[in-house]
Image: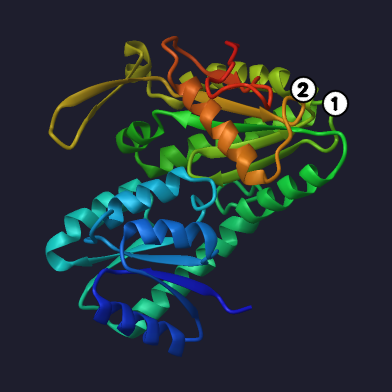
Amino acid sequence: MTARILVADDDEDIRAYLEVTLQLAGFEVLLAADGVEALQVARTGHPDVVVLDVMMPNLDGLNALRRMREDPRTSHLPVMLLTAKVQTGDAIIGLDAGADDYLTKPFDPDELVARVRAAMRRADTQRTRNPLTGLPGNESILAKLAQLLAAPGGFALLYVDVDRFKPYNDHYGFLRGDEALVALGSLLQAARDELDDPDAFVGHVGGDDFVVLVRPDLAELTAELICGRFDALAPSLYDADDLATGGIEVTDRRGIPQRFELLSLSIGIASTAIRDFAHHGDMVATATEMKGYAKGRRTPGSAYRIDRRAPEDGAEPAVELP
């Protein structure tokens, strides 16, 4: 099957150049003239890689990238940014916002093709099995969700996210950050293995995002178990001096020091016992919404929120504190 590349650039000549370059390399090319159109095509055209120009009208590449990462339908897509040399600072911000790579204009066409292929290889690896934790990646997660939605009995989706992971990563470095994610992956697998559910599933979406799929009646028990164990684990991830002060201090881009408490988890739960979901993307979106409510808590430590809205309910979620 021919891979699809979405190219978004407001310059018609550059779009045409990119289209020909990628077509000659054997790719199918989808085109967009600005960030708004890029979002629409990304949601409906099912591209394998997105190439976004940073400077575009209506919606620039950086904000289009942020919206893609927030949308369950596009959050998994590899994104490459195109920038002018004077915009490399924007490219760094883009990498921080979730871009996978960037190229500066003018660029060598062979390098563009090579980087697109590299992005696809990385994405293929992550979709089947996450290289860091060894857990099933996006492709396996989506396949499992589709399988469970088609089967009788129902299930619950727990979307697990690490709070304040970026400042932790910035403070201790990527190696310590990776160690924390591996520890969380092991914790989730251990919790799964203790459940009375042979079909329970743990997957690693990427970064600090994980999913756990369990029977609906086990959803809250599982969330409570995970929250309690991670809160017990979190202190071991810190140096003694930082632990004594209750967290870390990280300087932001403006040079202002910020205090951050210990790592914790926010878990959003969507369950087929509450409502029917026509597509797994709807279920992921609901769990993501609940995760946002969990992050909005004012109490320390890990927490979960579960969607209790009946299908006829209004927009305000019925959430319960753990």
Q: Amino acid at mark 2?
A: Leu
Q: CA separation, marks 2 and 1?
A: 8 Å
Q: Residues within 10 Å of mark 2 (few under 14, many from 20)?
A: some
**Residue at 67% across / 45% down in the picture?**
280
Q: Is residue 26 above or below residue 262?
A: below
Residue linked to disc 2: 218
Q: Secondary structure at mark 2?
A: helix
Helix, strand, or loop for circle 1?
A: loop
Report whether 311 appears left or right of 151.
left
| Residue indicated by mark 1 | 196
Quadrant where the N terminus is found in the figure: bottom right
Q: Quadrant of the C terminus?
A: top right
On the question of residue 236 being in view, the answer is no
Q: Which amino acid type is shown beneath numbered disc 1?
A: Asp
Q: Are marks 2 and 1 in contact (CB under 8 Å)?
A: yes
Left or right: 164, with 44 as reference point: left
Q: Residue at x 57, y 26 (%)?
A: 267
Indicate which disc residue 289 carries: none
x and y percent of residue 187 in the render?
A: 64, 30
In depth, the one of 295 and 133 nearer the eye is 295
* Residue 20, horizontal then vertical, whole percent: 38, 87
**Residue 145 in picture, x, y percent from top left:** 72, 45
Image position of 84 (left or right of 201): left
